[in-house]
Amino acid sequence: MATKFTINGEAHELDVPPDMPLLWALRDHLQLTGTKFGCGMALCGACTVHIDGQATRSCITPVAAIEGKEVTTIEGLATPAGKAVQAAWIGLDVPQCGYCQSGQIMSAAALLAGNAKPSDADIDQAMSGNICRCATYARIRSAIHQAADQLAAAPSQG
Amino acid sequence: MDSRYFRSLALTAAPGPAELSRRQFLKLTSLAGSGLTLGVLLPGCAPAGKGPDTAASGPLSMPFVRIDPDNTVTVICKHVEAGQGVWTGLPAIVAEELDADWSQMRAESAPAQVPQYGNFAFDPKGSVQGTGGSTAVANSWNQLRQAGATARAMLVAAAARAWDVPPAEVTVSSGVVAHAGKNRKASFGELASLAARERVPGEVTLKDPAAFRLIGAQAQRLPRLDSKAKSTGTQQFAIDVTLPGMMTAVVMRPPLFGSKVQSVDASQARAVDGVVDVVTVPRGVAVIGRDMYSAKKGREALKVVWDESGAEKRGTAEMLRDYRALARGKDAVVAGQHGDVDGTLAHAAHRIEAEFEFPYLAHAPMEPLTAVCNLQPDKCEIWAGCQFQTIDQMNAAAQVGLKPEQVTIHTLAAGGTFGRRANPESDYIVEVTSIAKAVGGKYPVRLIWTREDDITGGKYRPLKLHHITAGLGKNGEVAYRQRVVGQSIMSGTPFAAMIKDGVDPTAIEGNAPEQYDLEHAHVSWTPTKSPVTVLWWRSVGHSHMAYSKEVMIDELAQAAGEDPVAFRLKHLGKHPRHAAALKLAAEKAGWDQPFAKQPGRGRGVAVHESFGTVVAQVAEVTVSGDKISVDRVVCAVDCGIAVTPDVIRAQMQSGIGYGLSAALHGKITLTGGKVDQTNFHQYQVLRMNEMPKVIEVHIVPSANPPSGVGEPGTPPIAPAVANAVRMATGLKLRSLPFDLAAARAAKA
């Protein structure tokens, strides 16, 4: 039975087994490869997407669980917080290998959407589920602060 | 990896005549050790007759630089971009000599093709294309300066001809070619097709480094060329490759190292919806499905009986017990000795004996090993984040019965590697090609390793044990005796030819007498054997040798009642670059100021040279209970001319984080031969909350040619932290990863 949901603003119907992880449905069946596979156990955060605005690990989320929901991937990230985060990421040259960064950005965008001025402790709390083996953490932290500042300075933009 | 390792390998990888015939654009008339000399005409080099306004719209295309009519300058990078920044560093070298504007620079991967894209650090003939040993910028330095200057000269020649002015009067600045007298200006793009008709100059003049504008420690930050793609999900990795009709494979591999397939019952696996094939290949049994979901389901249903007769059945605890006994035995090869070690130790004023243990470590790059193969009767195409293109080409060719030149490799950005993708047997490349062969090439195959495959799959940094006795003689002279016990990385591989007088250089590199002026020293190695597979892991032997060295030196300083920095400097007289980096780190860290004596706070230092780069680090820690927090790291690095300083800073931060990850958590253990860890819940790695809040990187000014930065940031951090913890707690950390509870118990 097909699952109906919204992906990056467009209505979709996907006929795959209901227990297929959303990650592989996105990657193998919707050609949305910006969302990455890192562990398959919600341990690394590389697969992070937004479901109804909440940062969610797509690798352990079965397709059945997104029936009727709104899924946003890195390809469709267009919120003010999301755009500010991406601009800060590029401006500070956060990525190294870059493989984990889609997930990092989705987590950071969700953090800023709910907390306009996160402290270092807030960032630790929100971001420690996202592993970066290149250890770009220091720049991720700076970029989140920068994005928060930019959003505060120009809340209507983005 | 060290470039030395590759010299002999080149003998086995010399290109055949077919390799030479494949050069499409240029003949290389000579390959000097210092770089490339371009000496013949480009094809289609008809005399330039048309002015720039009517120019045809072709590019200026050379082996390392392509200038397109759209005014972009693309640098063809022979090294894989795995995060270390070669897609920025290599274009920066070209842009400097070309006087390009940074905004017009682009990067793309070179095809797998030697000697054109060979690594001169591996061997002077460029017989092997590959990335490793922190050599990318170092071995490309002269070559890409030449390439940039050559392209510049051809643009100038084209402009001079078109404008009918002497070439010497043509200027180039920030991507604009101009003649002041005639008030003419042209972009590189406008001149590209004309420049392509110019003769390639035999000799070009390189810039005086004093005139460098884009590169160097004082230059403005050059934005990375890959940040946008990597911040928008559009960077393509091997795992993202999709070909028409492509199927996905996962492999069930032996549960014990050294075991083999005995029998396979694939009936239930084949019954899984979406599974299209199950094939036995040399490295295991592959289950192929129409997507990852079905391939994994199929593998879960697969039943394999393994022949474990040749398997490793010891656990790491037993292996370490064996290592301890070996460390005390006579069986060892001597790597170096001088002075009177025993005599000095016998009468030493201070004497320290210690045993250090280093676990197996998985590299765990964020992109698990992945590769795509499209096999046809007369050719084989591979997409992967290849780190050893020439070796991968040879291994793939051998697997499918083709010649190396029939194997095309598309090198994609690698989602991290840290050495893992550079392995002499090309494990994952051999797997994907063998699967493609087993299914007769009837569809393209995408191989994905799961994280469990990665963590349990071997190719670890070797388990090591060091036994060290060090002492100070009556006049403060140092005696240092070290035995290293553990597996060889090179033995049994094409790199075995690098094992000289029985010593695998990766086993003992960066040892104390190499790095300090020690009056009496003896370093030996006892090689061990196990079916557990081992490999170079970011900074290779330095990753453990630096640790015991810097901890022992620190304890000797303490025993002598001397300041750790001053004591080191006293023994670095013949190592001025070490001394300069150490002084810079100490100065910037405020080492001469008394460190706040709050409970649990400590400060430690370490300095180490690897791959031609010297790095000193001062770490400040807070110990609370059994938890170590690294609050601040001050890092000084001497890597010669700083090509892209911000990439250097990023690599130091990265090396520190990677080394800290291993120091605080990294551990692969075996029980009954089986790996205990399967995923990141058991193989823990550094996360955001543990990253030092402050990392300062200071670059030692230098006019020397650049050396690498991908690995050298890693070795000093663990000993700097250990020395800080000792200051804070008095605990001596002898085993990695750090375990304060165990250290306390050992002390009690």
Image: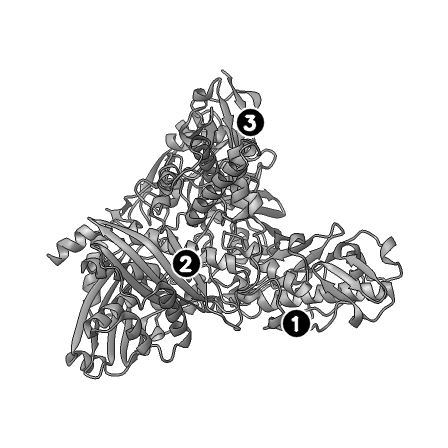
Q: Which residue is mark 2?
A: B696
Give the foreground label among 2 and 3: 2
Q: Which residue is mark 3?
A: A8
- x and y percent of residue B144 in the render? 62, 64
Residue found farthest to the left = B748
Q: Quadrant of the N terminus of chain B?
A: bottom left
Letter of the chain that mark 2 sits on in the rendering: B
Letter of the chain that mark 3 sits on in the rendering: A
* Viewer-closest of B691 and B219: B219
Relative to B379, A133 lies left or right: left
Relative vertical location of residue B509 with respect to residue B55 in this rendering, above or below: below
Relative vertical location of residue B114 with respect to residue B238 in this rendering, above or below: below
Whether callout 1 and callout 2 share a subunit is answered yes
- x and y percent of residue B307 in the render? 31, 44
Cα distance between the residues tagged 1 and 3? 51 Å
Mark 1 neighbour class, 10 Å CA radius: few under 14, some 14 to 19, many 20 or more? some
Mark 3 neighbour class, 10 Å CA radius: few under 14, some 14 to 19, many 20 or more? some
Instruction: Give the mark count.
Output: 3
First along the sequence among labels 1 and 2: 1
Q: Which residue is mark 1?
A: B206
**Hey, what amino acid is under mark 3?**
Asn
Whether callout 1 and callout 3 share a subunit is answered no
* Viewer-closest of B492 and B663: B663
Relative to B180, A54 lies left or right: left
Mark 2 neighbour class, 10 Å CA radius: few under 14, some 14 to 19, many 20 or more? some
Cα distance between the residues tagged 1 and 2? 33 Å
